[in-house]
Image (cartoon, rainbow, N blue to C red):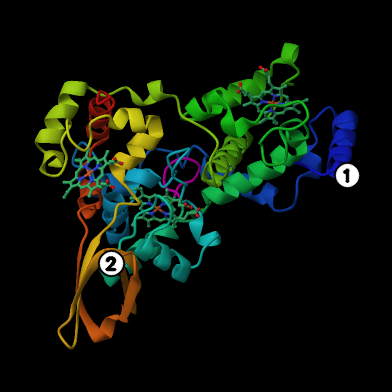
Amino acid sequence: MSSGIEKIRNAAILATTGFLVFQAAQSFRTAPVLAAQRAAQSPQNPQSPQSPGAAAQANAGGKQVPEDPGAKSYAKQCAICHGDQREGILPAFPPLLGIKRQMNDQQITDLIHKGKGRMPGFPKLPNEELTALLTYLSTAETSAGSTASGAASTTVHSSSLAEAGGGLFQQNCAFCHGRDAQGGETGPDLTQSKLVLGDKNGDQISEVVRNGRPEKKMPAFNFSSQELLSLVAFIRAREAAAASQKGGRRGVEVADLQTGNLAAGKEYFNGAGGCSKCHSPTGDLAGIATRYQGLKLEMRMLYPEDAASKVTVTTRDGKTFEGTLAYRDEWIIGLRDADKTYHSWRIQDVKYKVDSPVDAHVEQFPKYTDADIHNLMAYLQSLR
Ligand code: HEC
Ligand code: HEC
Ligand code: HEC
């Protein structure tokens, strides 16, 4: 998708420098960021999965219990989709690191209240919790790539990591892989690459970049590990963006989701998960695995976004209306009745009750472990 001029410019750079121009030509922005990251990684300031302070305060063995109420709320409500460290779960759920650079508090608040696409709304989140969440979302990453320990702590957002990687990518990779990593003249689309998708910690991407595949026209590059990290962050960000594009055109291998235990999933379904209160494997969920596969099925299970809520509205003069919820914000409630006619009222003028059985799914988020989800998936995938 790069313009012709861009290509020619890149071609010239590649031709004259043999790819390695980043040190000289790097923008002013990225150099200090990389320097800061190096400083943050120095031996006096070792990287650990949790900052030492947090570990000392909160770790009573097993999972870390976050101290800060925003982090707590995040872990409970959001981590299941956006990842424990806000890194996102690709390809379906975008990372939230550095989100404050893209969205302001009001936009994030609206999104959390109303939801969007596959993201459910959380209309009942108390105000204090929301405020704590917004504060938490503006904090920097605490594990990979930066650290907050020490007096002169350097705050490095993952988005600046991706930004630094973006600079390197444009200079060194875009000519072949396209400016957005979605493929170019000679290089494949990295946002759809199986290798990229399956590479949890960036090791495989780094290896390809370090060694190249000379016989296949992928050159080798001599980057520092910090530069490689930033390249990986950039490729991940492009991958997330590509995945959230409308009609996301990629699929996850069904096999990737088949790591659970069917019997344990069935037990959870009928027991702790409470799924059998509303569903039956021979009734409404019969053939579910034929209707949806892979990630799509997992998403239906986690949050069936289009499920209708029932509403009953009672007006001041005592009339009652029933239907499916068609609209709700802070001021207006709207429903569609049995004849598909739309009615709406100012909330202050009526009493209403929303019955949203699908809320059970949202309430389940904080309770699932990863194993529960994998086991459930194994079970649901047997319902063909
Ligand atoms: C069931 C999964 C799920 C849960 C739970 C969830 N989200 Fe999301 N979220 C998504 C999806 C999917 C998107 C992408 C929506 C789209 O663009 O269509 C998203 C998008 C976002 C975005 C916008 C990101 C961007 O780059 O545009 C923000 C901010 C966000 N979520 C915050 C939160 C917060 C805060 C919570 C917890 C209160 C939360 N989400 C819980 C699935 C989820
Ligand atoms: C001269 C063109 C060219 C340049 C420049 C280039 N690549 Fe590649 N790259 C390729 C080709 C061609 C392949 C496919 C090789 C193959 O078929 O195994 C590839 C493969 C890859 C893969 C493996 C994808 C997969 O699915 O196996 C990764 C990751 C990658 N490149 C990253 C990068 C990064 C990061 C840069 C910049 C630092 C870069 N490439 C620069 C041409 C290029
Ligand atoms: C309080 C009732 C309730 C509970 C409990 C519940 N669900 Fe649901 N579920 C629903 C409703 C309502 C829908 C939307 C049905 C529709 O749109 O046809 C739904 C939809 C689904 C779907 C998508 C069905 C489809 O055809 O698209 C799956 C899969 C699912 N639930 C799995 C589960 C699992 C697994 C559990 C237990 C962890 C669970 N549900 C717990 C009410 C519930």
Amino acid type indicated by mark 2: Asp
Q: Nearer the viewer, residue 361 or 354?
A: 354
Secondary structure beneath dot 2 equals: loop
Image coordinates for residue 376, horizontal then vertical, percent: 23, 31
Question: Was residue 60 drawn as part of the magenta stretch in this picture?
Answer: no
Q: Is residue 12 above or below residue 222?
A: below
Question: Was residue 145 drawn as part of the magenta stretch in this picture?
Answer: yes
Q: Is mark 1 within 8 Å of ligand 2?
A: no
Marker count (numbered) = 2
Q: Residue furthest top?
A: 215
**Residue at coordinates 72% horizontally, 41% vertically from top-left?**
179
- Which of the labelled discs sits on residue 337, or is there none? 2
Please tell me in which quarter of the rendered image ligand 3 is found: top left
Q: Which residues are magenta?
A: 141-147
Q: Residues within 10 Å of mark 1 (few under 14, many from 20)?
A: few
Secondary structure beneath dot 1 equals: helix
**Residue at coordinates 35% horizontally, 42% vertically from top-left?**
50
Q: Are marks 1 and 2 in contact (CB under 8 Å)?
A: no
Which residue is label 1 attached to? Answer: 5
